[in-house]
Image (cartoon, rainbow, N blue to C red):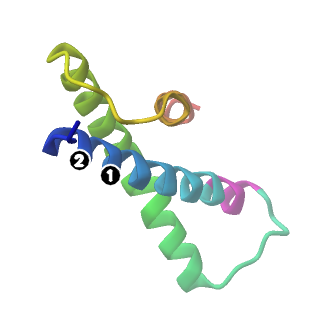
Amino acid sequence: MSKSTSNISLSFIAKVAIICNVFYLLSLLVMTVQWFKIPAVVSNFIAVLGLEMAPGVNIAFVMAWIWVKLAKKDNYVENWKTILIVLMLSIQVGTLFI
């Protein structure tokens, strides 16, 4: 059984989304906790990956995952990754309105 290009792309997007979500949580930590001091260069890198890339990558993953499900193709992404990404997307949408 060979993986199709869409499933390989979906697996890659899932890995990138998880990395960006970790940086999203770190950026929330930097913004909310006063004693957590890091250099400005590192803080800017965390903010770009976390606050700017994470929502876009999560939306791209969810849309691609829905496309794979509607096309009834095999899904090579583990369930825990899908649940984590959807949960993080809902947290990001929730923190947008706080």
Q: What secondary structure is found at the residue carrying circle 2?
A: helix
- Is residue 15 shown above or below 65? below
Relative horizontal placement of residue 43, taking residue 50 as reference (left or right): right
The numbered dot on residue 12 is 1
Residue under numbered circle 2? 9
At 81% from the left edge and 64% from the top edge, which residue is drawn? 34
Classify 16 as above or below 6: below
Q: Quadrant of the N terminus?
A: top left
Q: In whole angstroms, how far apart are the C-alphas of marks 1 and 2?
A: 5 Å
Q: Residues within 10 Å of mark 1 (few under 14, many from 20)?
A: few
Amino acid carrying label 2: it is Ser
Residue lying furthest front = 1
The magenta region covers 28-32
Chief SS of the magenta region: helix
Q: Residue at x 50, y 64 (%)?
A: 47
| Location of residue 76 in the rendering, given as x and y in whole percent from the top left corner | 35, 35
User: Residue at (28%, 41%) from the top-left corner?
Assistant: 10
* Residue displayed at 22% across by 41% down: 3
